Image (cartoon, rainbow, N blue to C red):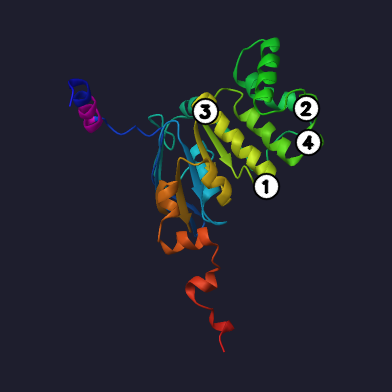
Amino acid sequence: MSDTRANLAQDAKTSKPATPIISVQGVVVRYGERTILDGVNLDILPHEVMVIMGASGSGKSTLLRQMVGLEKPKAGRIIIKGVDITSCPESELNEIRRVMGVSFQSAALFNSMTLGDNVALPLREHTKLAEPTIKLMTQMKLAQVGLEDSEHLYPAQLSGGMRKRASVARAVAMDPEILLFDEPSAGLDPIIAAEIDELILHLKRAFNMTIVVVTHELASAFSIADRMCMLYKGKMLAVGTKEEIRGSDQPRIRQFLDRIPDKQLDGEPSYLQG
């Protein structure tokens, strides 16, 4: 082996794993007596697309809200870019939020504002940019999501897919390092859903973002993910590559992937038995 190849091999052996950009550590969330997240651990690496999967009520969206700092857990902590957002001052949390963009399931656009004003809102609220610069940046963000020449429209005039794209344009207005999606394909037909998947992959390739996607849509999940994790009743069942999750023999993961009803997995309930 040449000296160069030997050095490369040595580098590969001694290289350290990437430091997570988001680290969820033992997070517990309760609403009253109900436990929503039960000791959840998850490391998300820089520049990857992490897909969080699980059935309805498994805690997916709750975990996303914890990452944004909209709620504080009963126990555990969440480290984002080295900052514990569960205990840091509000001013530091707001600084971390500046590097994050969120696209909500319902798009959460302001109906009284045009599309252009919706996208420009973060720039007007959080920067001191001149209005002509904000207008130019708004047009650029809309063009990135395929909505050029639509800035004068209102949310009520947009299709479901266009509203999702507009939500993404607003989420990336501040050029975030981290982009969070809550059910980006929910309520969309398969063709529009595939276009949203392509948009997510485009954002990752073009801007090298870290992207976290909450979804129960299997086709989208396996299309966009670098790694995936699976929640079940507030517990983390598995974290791995698409291939590892697809090949898992864990019963609840197989149930989700193979669309098996509970009564087939657990046996028929007593009221159905003769």
Farthest residue, direction bottom: 274
The kind of secondary structure element at disc 1 is helix
Crowding around mark 2 (Cα neighbors within 10 Å: few <14, some 14 to 19, many 20+) is some
> Pointer 2: what residue?
114
> Pointer 4: what residue?
158
N-term mark: 4 or 3: 4
The structure residue drawn at horizontal position 68% and vertical position 20%, both measured from the top left corner, is: 138
Mark 3: which amino acid?
Arg
Relative height, residue 253 to residue 154 (above, below): below
Alpha carbon distance from label 1 to label 2: 27 Å
Percent of width and height locating residue 89: 45, 29
Relative height, residue 164 to residue 96 (above, below): below
> Pointer 3: what residue?
205
Quadrant of residue 184 within the rendered picture: top right
152 left or right, relative to 55: right
Alpha carbon distance from label 1 to label 3: 23 Å
